[in-house]
């Protein structure tokens, strides 16, 4: 059996209407999984679903509402009949001076980035355990690994994701459920379109990345599929940086020879 195959598996991906989440949904589908897609944008979800081959399920929901994660879990299990893979990808981002960060924004970030993954994981753990080969993959960020200016509140939520990952891995490992996180660097998605127009931004990001390029969503998605697959059967509690070396390298000469 191909250890990278997810044939016959059922997966749920949050934030699946665009960007990294859409790429993850497509990669899981290519690996053979049937995927439930969750996000606020129904039209975006339906567009992604139209590109999938394995009878996808569309579940529009605002995971920032504390009642929605358990409802989403119930709808997904009813539609799929069980679950082997949960990908907690949905997140809000914010970049501003900490002096301008108010309580409402912090609460909003934690509601989507931390509370929702915890509640959704809790609601789906019984089904993941029942499958006998369950895996949870959480999306973290390079901001949880290194200091990124003007992102203190966002970075705090992603640091919480990594801590949650380790705790869940210890809690659930004895029962055979693996939990890992993936920390992307700078990914070329619509979120960065405006900033890419600022002079020097593209070149600056590339200079800080060992592979000297931006990530594509598929670069992250393939790591998620690996961690969800039997190929990663002895990997748990890890945060895997899919950042082109950004968090682990420093070129003090700025690329000069």
Image (tube, rainbow, N blue to C red):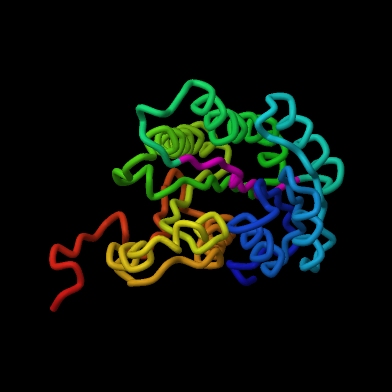
- For image coordinates 65% across by 48% down, the residue present is 15
Residue 33, position as x, y percentages in the image: 72, 61
Quick one: which residue is furthest to the bottom in this view? 257
Q: Is residue 230 visible?
A: no
Quadrant of residue 6 within the rendered picture:
bottom right
Magenta includes 95? no
**Up-down: is 50 above or below 59?**
below
Magenta includes 90? yes
**Up-down: is 68 above or below 186?**
above
Left or right of 83, for residue 122 = left
Left or right of 129, for residue 216 = left
Q: Nearer the viewer, residue 221 or 211?
A: 211
Residue 90, position as x, y percentages in the image: 61, 44
Left or right of 182, for residue 68 = right
Q: Nearer the viewer, residue 62 or 4?
A: 62
**Up-down: is 70 above or below 231?**
above
**Up-down: is 168 above or below 234?**
above
Q: Nearer the viewer, residue 143 or 161?
A: 143
Left or right of 166, for residue 137 = right
Which quadrant of the rendered structure holds the N terminus?
bottom right
Residue 222, position as x, y percentages in the image: 55, 65
Which quadrant of the rendered structure holds the C terminus?
bottom left
Q: Which residues are magenta?
A: 83-94
Quick one: which residue is furthest to the top in this view? 103
- For image coordinates 30% across by 46% down, the residue present is 146
Which secondary structure class fits the magenta region best? loop
Q: Is residue 142 visible?
A: yes
Q: How many marks?
A: 0
- For image coordinates 72% across by 36% down, the residue present is 62
Residue 140, position as x, y percentages in the image: 47, 45
């Amino acid at each position: 059996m191909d250890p990278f195959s997810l044939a016959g598996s059922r997966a749920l991906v949050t934030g699946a209407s665009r960007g990294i989440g859409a790429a993850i949904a497509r990669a899981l589908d290519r690996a053979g999984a049937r995927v439930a897609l969750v996000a606020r944008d129904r039209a975006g979800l339906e567009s992604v679903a139209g590109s999938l081959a394995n009878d996808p399920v569309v579940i529009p929901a605002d995971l920032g509402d504390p009642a929605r994660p358990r409802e989403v879990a119930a709808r997904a299990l009813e539609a799929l009949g069980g679950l082997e893979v949960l990908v907690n990808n949905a997140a809000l981002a914010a970049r501003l001076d900490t002096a301008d960060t108010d309580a409402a924004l912090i609460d909003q970030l934690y509601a989507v980035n931390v509370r929702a993954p915890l509640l959704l994981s809790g609601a789906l753990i019984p089904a993941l355990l029942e499958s006998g080969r369950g895996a949870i993959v959480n999306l973290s960020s390079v901001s949880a690994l290194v200091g990124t200016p003007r992102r203190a509140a966002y970075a705090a939520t992603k640091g919480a994701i990594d801590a949650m990952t380790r705790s869940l891995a210890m809690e659930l490992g004895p029962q055979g459920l693996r939990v890992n996180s993936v920390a992307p660097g700078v990914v070329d998605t619509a979120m960065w379109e405006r900033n890419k127009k600022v002079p020097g931004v593209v070149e600056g990001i590339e200079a800080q990345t060992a592979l000297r390029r931006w990530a594509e969503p598929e670069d992250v998605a393939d790591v998620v599929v690996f961690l969800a697959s039997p190929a990663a059967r002895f990997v748990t509690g890890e945060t895997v940086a899919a950042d082109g070396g950004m968090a682990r390298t420093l070129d003090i000469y700025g690329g000069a020879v």
